[in-house]
Image (cartoon, rainbow, N blue to C red):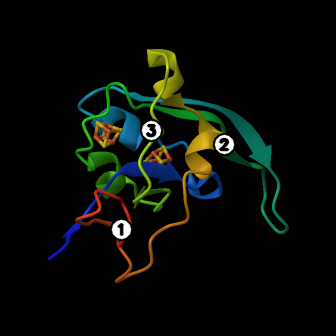
Amino acid sequence: MSEVSHAAIALVPASCTSCLICVRECPAWCIELDSHVEQVSEPGARRPRSVSVLDRFAIDYALCMYCGICVDVCPFDALHWVGAPVEPAGTRGDLVLGTDELAGLAAPTAPGEDWTRDERGGARG
Ligand code: SF4
Ligand code: SF4
């Protein structure tokens, strides 16, 4: 028997609207987000629309409790569980993963292909 493992949380930067919901809901306050506002003109629109553009997203895995609240509350599916665990770090600061690192953790697991911890102690299922 295998059990589903949620080893880390990855980010899809293109899906993140910088809405800050995950930042506010994280009980460990371990998500950092920087963004700026840009004016976007769309054909036919009377005036430009203001949109938030993500500059930096980071999770401090030294503080993260792996509760999954951020994944659950994101309205845009920009966060998802991956099975590959965060690499051990030499310093606490190395456990703060930024946008590119979070994006590169792994591809989203497809339905029915959740990673699992098996008897090998690995994180593959
Ligand atoms: S899993 Fe929980 S503690 Fe970790 S970043 Fe998400 S909300 Fe915060
Ligand atoms: S809740 Fe989702 S869309 Fe909003 S800031 Fe967090 S990751 Fe980005």
- Distance, label 2 to label 1, CA atoms, is 22 Å
Q: Nearer the viewer, residue 29 or 39?
A: 29
Disc 2 within 8 angstroms of ligand 2 (CB): no
Residue lying at 33% horizontally and 33% vertically, measured from the top left? 24
Which numbered disc flags the more N-terminal residue, 2 or 3? 3
Q: Nearer the viewer, mark 2 or mark 1?
A: 1
Observer able to see residue 17: no
- Distance, label 2 to label 3, CA atoms, is 18 Å
On screen, residue 74 above or below 18? below
Q: Is residue 124 left or right of residue 108?
A: left
Query: At numbered mark 2, what does the secondary structure look like: helix, strand or loop?
Result: helix
User: What residue is disc 2 on?
Assistant: 100
Observer able to see residue 94: yes
User: What residue is disc 3 on?
Assistant: 20
Name the mark on residue 16. none
Q: Are marks 2 and 1 in contact (CB under 8 Å)?
A: no
Quadrant housing residue 50 = top right
On screen, residue 99 above or below 61? below
Residue found at the very far front of the displayed protein: 120
Query: At numbered mark 3, what does the secondary structure look like: helix, strand or loop?
Result: loop
Which numbered disc flags the more N-terminal residue, 3 or 1? 3
Disc 3 within 8 angstroms of ligand 2 (CB): yes
User: What residue is disc 1 on?
Assistant: 115
Q: Amino acid at mark 3?
A: Leu
